Amino acid sequence: MGRDDLPTPATDAGRAGLDALLARPGQALVAVDFDGTLAPIVPDPDQARAHPEAAPALARLAPRLAAVAVITGRPAGLAVRYGGFTADPALGDLVVLGGYGAERWDAASGEVRTPPPHPGVEAVRDELPALLAESEQGVHLEDKGRALAVHTRRAAEPAAALERLRAPLAVLAGRHGLTVEPGRLVLELRPPGMDKGQALTGLVRETGARTVLYAGDDLGDLAAFDAVERLRGEGVRGLLVCSGSDEVTALADRADLVVDGPEGVVRLLTALAAALPAASGA
C-alpha cells in the first residue's frame, strides 16, 4: 500500500496539505473528532465505541508524525476508554482533548487535567429533567459532567423533536450562562469560552506543526475547520476531512476530502500510515 492507495483531495489547498504531510511527516499534526469520526453514531451514546481499527491506525501513524490527537465534546477520560487508546505503547504521546478542549488527557501521564465545573451546568442539571418530562418519549439526556446533551435520535420524529426543543433549551442555557451547541440530533448545553478551533490551534502552536490534518463529522467541528483555514493564511498547510453522513452536510460542503463515515476515516488513516516512511523526518 502506498501513495496510490490514498484518495485525492478535491481542492488545491487539500492536495497541497496532503503533499506536505507526505513530504514532511515529522512536521505534521493529525487530529480527529471521536463520535461520528472514529466511532459510529449509535442510539445510546454510552454504547459508542471506536471502530476496532481506529486505535491501531492511529498507533501506526503516531511514530511518524509530530503529534496525533483526538478532540471531542466528550469527557476526555471517557473518550480514552471508549477509544481503547491505552492498549498500544505506540500511542504513548497521544493527546485527547475533551469538553471541546477544556479537558486534557496525556498518554504519557495517564492523567486528565480539567478546570473547575461551571456553576451553570449544575443548575441546568437540576432543571432539565422537568423540562424534558414535558417533551415526547425517546428524548434522552446524556450527562457529560461539564456539559449536558439532549438527544432526540430515539424519539418518534427525531428532527421535529429537536426543533421543538431548540427554543426552551436556549432560554434555559442563557439563564445560567451556558451556550447551546447543535449537532447530529443533539443539543448540548455547555460552558462558553472553548471550542475545537481554539483547541486545535493550541496544539499546532504547542507542537510547532507546519501541516495539520483535521477530521470531523458534525457542526461542532466547523470551528476546527475555521481554524485550519486561518492557519493556512499563516503558511501552515491543511487538509480538511469530513466523515460523511446524511444527517449533516455543512462539513462536506467545506471539506477537501469526504470519506464514508468512521470506516472511511480508518481506511484513510491506515493508507496514510502505509504511505509514510518508517520513521518521521523533517
Image: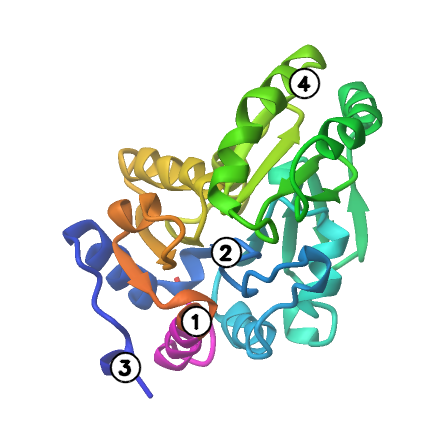
Q: Amino acid at mark 2?
A: Val
Point out the stretch of residues depicted in magenta. Answer: 267-281
Q: Amino acid at mark 1?
A: Leu
Circles 2 and 1 in contact, beta carbons < 8 Å: yes
User: Gap between marks 3 and 1, in whole Å?
Assistant: 11 Å
User: Gap between marks 1 and 4, in whole Å?
Assistant: 40 Å
Q: Is residue 94 on the magenta stretch?
A: no
User: Gap between marks 2 and 4, in whole Å?
Assistant: 31 Å
Circles 4 and 3 in contact, beta carbons < 8 Å: no
Q: Which mark is residue 51?
A: none
Say which element carries label 2.
strand
In the orientation shown, which residue stands out farthest toward the top?
175
Q: Position of residue 217 (x, y in %)?
A: 43, 52
Q: Which residue is mark 4?
A: 172
Say which element carries label 1.
helix
Q: Is residue 272 on the magenta stretch?
A: yes
